[in-house]
Image (tube, rainbow, N blue to C red):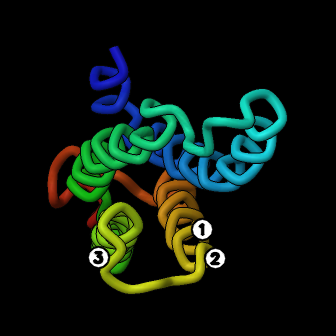
Amino acid sequence: IIMNISLRKPDTIGAIVSTLCVVHCLLTPLLFVAQSYTATHSHEAPFWWKNLDYLFILISIVAVYESAKKSTNKLIKAGLWMSWIILFLLILNEKLVWIEFDEIITYAVALTLSMLHIYNLNYCQCETENCCNNK
């Protein structure tokens, strides 16, 4: 059902998923603190929580693809794809630890992706290439 909604309203889904990704990243430290109070022998987040990033990335690539396909602004199209690729690489880097980055970079990229989706919601979107030429 998410994929069906994503195809109809990709910018709305993209903005929501990008924002949820930031919330997920912000809540992770709180999860560790809460978990330390409840279980002194376990210091890791649950498996599903650690891999929620991948779900966000999968949903967001569909949203970016559909949004870029319908957008008439080439800068927004490029921005959506660049933001998604950078976010993907940052999340992959976080899992594999190639280079140490401050978490604020991931938050900024995810918020940028969300803002691009929100901006694109208000920009002319077309089903065909020439639909906005007459406006």
Give the residue drawn at x 34%, y 49%: 57
Q: Specify the amino acid type for callout 3.
A: Ala
Classify mark 2: helix, strand or loop.
Answer: helix
Q: Mark 3 or mark 2, which is nearer to you? A: 2
Quadrant for the C terminus, please.
Answer: bottom left
Give the residue drawn at x 41%, y 57%: 124
Mark 3 — residue?
78
Mark 1 — residue?
107
Looking at the picture, tell me which residue is in the foreground, 125 or 130. Answer: 125
Contact between marks 1 and 2 (CB within 8 A): the answer is yes
How far apart, in angstroms, are the residues tagged by discs 3 and 1? 19 Å
Quadrant for the N terminus, please.
Answer: top left
Query: How many C-alpha atoms fall within 10 Å of the one at disc 3: few (<14), some, or many (≥20)?
Result: few
Instruction: Judge whether residue 135 can be spotted in this image.
Output: no
Please say if 60 is above or below 80: above
Q: Position of residue 44 (x, y in %)?
A: 55, 43
Give the residue drawn at x 56%, y 55%: 118
Mark 2 — residue?
104
How far apart, in angstroms, are the residues tagged by discs 3 and 2? 22 Å
Give the residue drawn at x 56%, y 40%: 45
